[in-house]
Image (cartoon, helix red, strand yellow):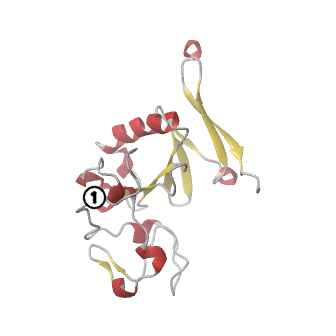
Amino acid sequence: MSGEVGALVPGRECGACAMCCKVYPIDWLDKPKPAGKWCHHCVPGTGCRIWQDIPKQCGDYYCHWRRNAQLGDAWRPDRAGFLINQNAPHMPYEVIVDTGKPDAWRKEPYYTQLKRAALVAIGEKKAVLLIIGMRQWVMLPDEEVPIPPDKIDGDLRIYQEPAHTGGKWRVEFLGKPQPA
C-alpha cells in the first residue's frame, strides 16, 4: 500500500464506485448517516445525485485507490468490497470494509497483499487497521488483533517477540494520546 499518496493517479476515476458514500459516517449533510448505510443522495452503481452541489468534505475526499498507482483495478473499492484510506502520511492505513461484504478483505489477491502491507507498515512505524462497522482490528503479518472499544483511536506499539520464543507479532494498546 505504500507509494505516492499525494497526487491522484492520472486517468483513474471513481466511475460507478461510491463505496465512500456507504462505509463512512457522514454528519455534514442535511440528513446525517451512520457508517455502513448508503447516503440518501447516492445512487449505488451510479454516484451522487447532487454532484454539482456536493459538500466540500465529499468533493475533497479520494480513497487510496485513486492516489496509489500500485493498486490495480481489482482494488477499486466497489470491486474489492472495501476501501483503503490514509488520512496523513504519518497515520495508519485503514481498510474500511463494506458491512454487507465483511469477509471481502480475506479473499485473494487482497489477503496476501494486505498481510504484506502490514509488515511494510510496521517497518515504517505505522499500522494497518481493519474497520468493519463499529469494530476495529490491528492487522499484523500473522493475525488480526481486536482493538478494545476503549482503545480505539489510541496509541499502540507493534513488536515482534524474539525468535527463540516463536517470533510472534504482538500489539500493545497504550491508550488515548494526551492533549498537548
Does any portion of residue 99 appear in the rendered image? yes
Q: Quadrant of residue 84?
A: bottom left
| Of 124 and 19, the residue lying toward us | 124
Does any portion of residue 38 appear in the rendered image? no
Residue 167 horizontal side relative to residue 20, left or right: right
Crowd tier of the residue under label 1, counting other residues whose Cα lies within 10 Å: few below 14, some 14–19, many 20 or above: few
Residue found 55% across the figure and 38% down from its top: 125
Residue 11, given in percent of the width and then of the height, sits at: 22, 63
| Of 156 and 150, the residue lying toward us | 156
Where is 29 relative to 115, above or below? below
Where is 51 relative to 64, above or below? below
Residue 175 horizontal side relative to residue 98, left or right: right
- Residue denoted by label 1: 79
Tell me the amino acid under the disc marked 1. Arg
Residue 99 horizontal side relative to residue 158, left or right: left
Q: Quadrant of the N terminus?
A: top left
| Of 140 and 89, the residue lying toward us | 89
Residue found 66% across the figure and 46% down from its top: 155
Residue 57, given in percent of the width and then of the height, sits at: 48, 75
Q: Quadrant of the C terminus?
A: bottom right
Residue 52, given in percent of the width and then of the height, sits at: 35, 86
Residue found 28% across the figure and 42% down from its top: 109
Residue found 61% across the figure and 47% down from its top: 147
Where is 137 relative to 33, above or below? above
